[in-house]
Structure formats: C-alpha cells, structure tokens
C-alpha cells in the first residue's frame, strides 16, 4: 500500500510504497493527491516554527503560552543567580559573561519551579474530584512525551517543556496522566472518563500539539 505524509516542521513530503511499485504508479498516486499535499504543506508550515535559543538580551521566551522578552541583568560577583518576572519581561539576574548553557540552566530551574507549582494545584484538584490518593510526580527533560504514568510505582513524570505551553494544556496533561491509573490504554473508556472532568479535552490536545512543534 502506498502512503504519503507531510511532516512538520518544514512540510517535507514523505511517500512510501512497496518495493515492486512501478514508477508510473507512484507518480499517478502522488498526482492524484497533489491538491491535498499543497493544503497539507501549507497547514504544516503555518504552525509555529521551532526556535533555537541562545538566551541573549531581547530574545523571546515562553511561559505558559505567553511570550516574554528576556532581559539579562548583571549581578554582583558573589551574588547567586536568580530569575524574576515583571510584566512582559523575564529577567535573568546572572553574570553577563555567563555561557549559554548556564543561562539555559537558570531558566530551566525557573521553569521547573513554576511548573511544579501549577501541576501541584491541578493534581490536588483532580485528586479530590477523582477521590484518589496523592500521586507523586517529577519534572524531567523528555524528548517526545509530555507525561508518563508509571503504574508499578504509581507515579508521574512531566516534561519540563510543559512550562512553555498554555495552562489549559498543562491541565489536560495532568488529568490525562492521572486517568491512566484507571485505564492504561487510550481507548473510549479512557477518554470518557477524562471527559467527565474536562469536556473540551480534544481542543486542549489540539492546542498542545500545535505548541509541541515549536518547542
Ligand atoms: Zn496517555
């Protein structure tokens, strides 16, 4: 069976066909889908594009879906680096000669702290709604998942990048992972259970996917 997909972030067209497919059949298959491909490429390219960071003055960073500009503020020689937030500015109070890695670590520590507070609030709320025992959680760097529920340990790991997506999406991931304690698979049961407390989970998931492309 032939397949064609359009991949984010660049909109590269990826087609697969069984080895014995003729060149003519492939061309026909693709030309029939030409309009669809054009639309799909356009759609993928209009998603927010991935950004690389060097954490310098004026750079745009995200906190819970809101864009802030980064300000670098020099600290005294023995002062400890810290982060503050004021209006639309996130300030890294750090040695101006600090490496990109140091700045990233400082911002990530701030993300971790903020995300941890938010997740705790949502988890407490759903614990009382679901009438379940508290579930311990950790925040770690993860490449391809927003969260993981470990049924054996009954614990959750959240992706630190959640600090950059809108709160409604963080809330979705929290409820999603907590629902896995009752239903391990992503089946109708699972989504029905989640919909009781979050009727708009689908919209939130779509929004989360869009954000995922730029992180
Ligand atoms: Zn899941």
Image: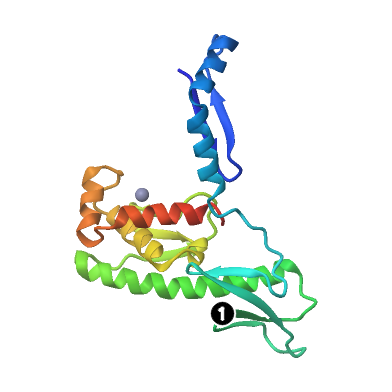
Left/right of residue 24 with respect to residue 98 in the rendered view: left
Residue name at image x 43 percent, y 56 percent: 208
Q: Nearer the viewer, residue 140 or 211?
A: 211
User: What colour scheme was applied to this rendering of the protein?
Assistant: rainbow
Q: Nearer the viewer, residue 127 or 57?
A: 57
Q: Which quarter of the picture shows residue 171?
A: bottom left
Above or below, 86 relative to 42: below
Q: Is residue 147 visible?
A: no
Residue name at image x 24 percent, y 52 percent: 182
| Mark 1 C-beta closer than 8 Å to ligand 1 | no
| Outermost residue to the right | 97
| Outermost residue to the front | 35
Q: How many marks are shown on the rendered structure?
A: 1
Left/right of residue 86 with respect to residue 203 in the rendered view: right
Q: Nearer the viewer, residue 40 or 160?
A: 40
Residue name at image x 22 percent, y 62 percent: 197
Looking at the rendered image, the quarter that the C terminus falls into is bottom right
Per the image, the residue denoted by label 1 is 88
Q: Position of residue 10 (x, y in %)?
A: 61, 43
Q: Around disc 1, counting alpha carbons within 10 Å, would you say few (fewer than 14), some (14 to 19), or many (20 or more)?
A: few
Q: Nearer the viewer, residue 114 or 90?
A: 90
Q: Position of residue 4 (x, y in %)?
A: 51, 27
Q: Position of residue 136 (x, y in %)?
A: 37, 66
Looking at the rendered image, the quarter that the N terminus falls into is top left
Q: Give the secondary structure at mark 1.
A: loop
Left/right of residue 109 with respect to residue 151 in the rendered view: right
Q: Position of residue 96 (x, y in %)?
A: 77, 79
Q: Is residue 81 visible?
A: yes
């Amino acid at each position: 069976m032939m397949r064609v997909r359009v991949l984010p972030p660049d909109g590269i067209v990826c087609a697969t066909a069984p080895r014995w497919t003729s060149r003519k059949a492939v061309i026909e298959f693709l030309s029939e889908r030409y309009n669809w491909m054009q639309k799909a490429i356009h759609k993928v390219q209009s998603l927010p594009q991935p950004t690389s960071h060097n954490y310098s003055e004026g750079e745009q960073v995200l906190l819970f879906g809101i864009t802030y500009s980064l300000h670098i503020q020099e600290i005294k020689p023995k002062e400890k680096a810290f982060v503050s937030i004021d209006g639309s500015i996130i300030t890294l109070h750090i040695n101006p000669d600090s490496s990109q890695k140091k700045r990233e670590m400082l911002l990530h520590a701030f993300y971790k702290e903020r995300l941890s507070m938010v997740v705790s609030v949502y988890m407490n709320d759903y614990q009382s709604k679901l009438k379940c025992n508290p579930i311990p959680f950790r925040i770690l760097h993860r490449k391809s998942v927003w969260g993981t529920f470990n049924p054996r340990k009954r614990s959750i790991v959240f992706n630190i990048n959640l600090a950059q997506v809108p709160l409604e999406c963080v809330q979705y991931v929290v409820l999603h992972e907590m629902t896995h304690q009752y239903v391990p698979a992503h089946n109708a049961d699972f989504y029905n259970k989640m919909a009781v407390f979050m009727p708009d989970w689908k919209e939130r998931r779509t929004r989360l996917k869009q954000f995922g492309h730029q992180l």
